[in-house]
Amino acid sequence: MSNSTLAGSGIESDLVRRTLRAMILSRTLESKLSSLYKAGKIVGGVYLGTGQEAFSGSLGACLDQEKDIFAPLIRDQAGRTAFGEPVIEATRTYLGSALGPMRGRDGNIHRGRPDQRRPAMISHLGTSVSLVAGMLMARRMKGELGGVVGATCVGDGATSTGAFHEGLNLAAVEKLPMVVLVADNQFAYSTPRERQFACENLIDRARGYGVTGTEVDATGLFSSLVAIHKAVESARAGGGPQMVVGKLLRLCGHGEHDDGSYVAKQLRESSLGQDCLEIGIKEVIDEGIATTEEVENWKTKATEHVQEAVATAQTEATPDPYKEDWRSLSAEGMQP
Amino acid sequence: MSVTYIDAIHQAQLELLRERDDVFLYGQDIGAFGGAFKATKGLQEEFPERVLDSPISEDAMVGVAIGASISGMRPIVEMQFADFSSIAFNQIVNHAGTHFYRTGVSVPITVRLPCGGTPGSGPFHSQMVETLYGHYPGIIVVTPATVSDAYHLLKQSVEIDDPVVFCEHKFLYRWLKTDQIDSDPLPLGVARITRPGKHATVVTYSAMVHEAVRAADRLAKEGWEIEVVDLRSVKPLDMDTVIASVARTGRLLALGEAFPWGGVTAEVVSQVVAEGFHLLDAPPMRLNAKDTPIPYHPDLWAVHRPTPESIIEKLRELLNF
């Protein structure tokens, strides 16, 4: 490849194409979810990852779907899609289908299939760091760690939590093959980063934890892919935990109930406010990795795919409160 | 050769490590040091890969346990003191406790909490926390009062596919002894009649079982026959045994070492009143610790928790109604 960003990175065209396709599918899905929310078809919140698709999608695409672990957070639709989460799981969960992975018991982004190495996030930020560490430690104890990478994502706000600190410190102590993405998207809900931490840059923290840190312009697809690909491969090769801080701007509200009016115009118009999807498409076409026609075809396919997944979920039964077993314990005889 | 309560916990862990490749122990100072109370003494030597020292990170310790448990392991986490589990509260109640209901994937973790007061331990090394964990769905809360129960309930806890909070009482660690572990354990979830009687029922658990028996022994000299029910686990709560006992005696004292607001004793009274109001010959009563932090000085501590004397006083009130 001639492009200086990708040159020497070991990144194949196929990985770039898969990442961009996941970004397109994610954006298409999330646009539809937003419309459904605004039309009153989704109860509860809708939380989008607009502007974070390159960063999140790169991680999902760089991981091995057959053996790696991916614990996404709130703005990781692109990563989920790139890691192989079927679109129907998102639409079923948002629309409360009884056939979804959460069966109406939890909603929106609080979904996953832990038995398929896709943990279901809880709302308490930072908790997934130690969770993934434990999943890796289990594999090590069983002699099954070989070549496995565990990854999770947080935002700049989550780095203020005790759980994040405890988890990353522990992962470093255990020298685990782990990748932690920090989407430094400038705001935790409405709180700007200067009210969140006092260090100049979040990447400074990596050194304190004893983990490898990389900072990347996450508005670019190629830059994101190169940094994350390297981090994943370093972790896989025994380099211990890797922290990748992506500099970007959340191009949506915290949720679709939030217009994000607290984001200054100047910031929105800065380089941080560029749309990674537009940049990614341009990078891929300019580099000759895909043609304009192919990209348009991917968009069309994405729209069809999303429409089908929404239509399917909308026709499915929602949970029946009178047939619900109301069990919180799996063991027989223990439920009060 | 006698076995103490802490020996029983040590023995159960040793056997679990030997019997099951999927069991591992995780906690602060539990490796070469053998744990603050020596519950893991020598275990790392035999199982260097499965007895691991953790950083002082209670949240992350339980996070690790959850992650390992959904990856096929059966972790036992040792909190150095139950009081410090407040740092892990979120992982226990919001992560482990919700997991099976949300995802259908169970979380077989056991969190050992050395709880309860000992003289001189003060506000942050003495607490009873079973109420906190019992309040949340998806968690089993075990409170052994005997050496054999400490052994068997710990082994049963690890076999269960759900999160178990194992409340072991520090006051019992060294002084409570038995000649040998019972070979025929009760199942988890079933209460025991520790001392049969007919005039009043004391429902209690953990170290307070022994204080209740002392009180009952003294009242026996006056002709009162007090029944003592040891709950063994506070969730599940064996109300069948409790109601059957109240049906025999007509009088209930719910006794606990925890703080008085809400809690296990309130739950027991509430359920007895709701389900067995017609069985009661007197208003049911509660006796708990005082509503202050747990004091350091042994003289203050000794009366902060219920004592045989305060239990007798309460029982006289109940019997004389």
Image (cartoon, coloured by chain):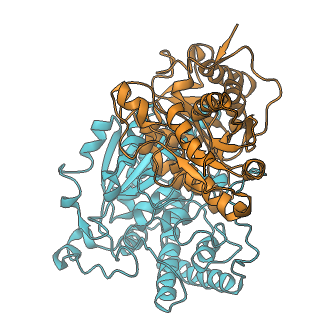
Chain colours: A cyan, B orange
Seen from the viewer's position, the closer of residues B115 and B216 is B216
Residue sitting at the far bottom: A39
Q: Is residue A142 visible?
A: no
Quick one: quadrant of the N terminus of chain B? top right
Picture coordinates of residue B114 (x, y %)? 51, 31
Instruction: Name the side, left or right, on which A170 lies relative to A248.
Output: right
A201 to A315, vertically: above or below: above
Residue A143 falls in which quadrant of the image? top right
Q: Please give the count of numbered marks on the rendered protein.
A: 0
Q: Is residue B126 above or below residue A255?
A: above
Which of these two is toward me, A208 or A229? A208
Toward the right, the furthest residue is: B184
Classify residue B249 as left or right of residue A272. right
Residue in the image at 74% along x and 58% along y: B279
Q: In the picture shown, does residue A90 fall above or below B43?
A: below
| In the image, residue A317 above or below residue B186 | below
Across and down, in percent, residue B211 comes to: 57, 31
Say whether residue B62 is left or right of residue B223: left
State whether residue A255 appears in this view: yes
Rendered residue at 61%/34% (across/down): B212
Give how far across and how far down residue B260 sits, in percent: 46, 49
* Picture quadrant of residue B57: top left
Question: Quadrant of residue A167 in the image?
Answer: top left
Q: Residue at x 52, y 87 (%)?
A: A36
Identity of the residue drawn at 67% across and 77% down: A97
Foreground pick, B8 / A137: B8
